[in-house]
Image (spheres, rainbow, N blue to C red):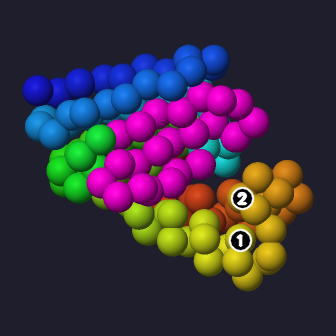
Amino acid sequence: GNDTYIFNANFGTDTIEDTQGTSTIKISKSIENIMFKQNGDEMQISSIGTADKINIRSWSQFKTQSDSRIITDTGTVLLVSQVEKLIQAMSTFTTSKGISWEQAVNNNKQDVMQLLATYSSSN
């Protein structure tokens, strides 16, 4: 069915395995403070500067839920279908600048926000 997962600050580590319906992941961070990392068929969403992370199992099925989304505390909406494109854009950005994503957020915030706006919308 349709599920909503809510992750507040200091939630630690949690795992989602949901392959049916529409899922909404609500995270109490702004979009620039979230990192995405794919490892096989698992997607990890982590919070920069904390140990908080969400592991999404069966990512290949989860991402096909067309209306599934990630919503941040600032109201930014990222469709799950856009996550892999965002990961590629983040990788290209950091490689071209020769810095990590965390460094980019701290030192090139305007460029980071422009990149993120390409793949997300405001709620």
Q: Nearer the viewer, residue 42 or 90?
A: 42
Q: CA distance from mark 1 to mark 2?
A: 6 Å
The magenta span reads 35-56
What secondary structure is the stretch in magenta mostly built from? Answer: strand
Which residue does the image show at 41% across and 37% down from the upper left?
55
x, y percent for residue 49: 75, 36
- The residue pinned by badge 1 equals 94
Which disc, if any, is residue 101? Answer: 2
x, y percent for residue 21: 13, 35
Q: Secondary structure at mark 2?
A: helix
Which residue does the image show at 85% across and 52% down from the upper left?
106
Q: Quadrant of residue 16?
A: top left
Q: Is residue 23 magenta?
A: no
The vertical placement of 7 against 53, above or below, is above
Q: Is residue 47 magenta?
A: yes
Mark 2 or mark 1, which is nearer the start of the sequence? 1
Q: Dividing the image into 4 quarters, which one contains the N terminus? A: top left
Q: Secondary structure at mark 1?
A: helix
Whether residue 107 is visible, yes or no, is yes
Q: Is the C-beta separation of discs 1 and 2 under 8 Å?
A: yes
Which residue does the image show at 35% across and 58% down from the upper left?
40
Q: Quadrant of residue 20?
A: top left
x, y percent for residue 103: 82, 57
Q: Quadrant of residue 4?
A: top left
Say left or right for 18 vs 51.
left
Q: Residues within 10 Å of mark 1 (few under 14, many from 20)?
A: some
Q: Amino acid at mark 1?
A: Thr
Say left or right for 52 vs 87.
right
The vertical placement of 19 against 52, above or below, is below
Q: Amino acid at mark 2?
A: Trp
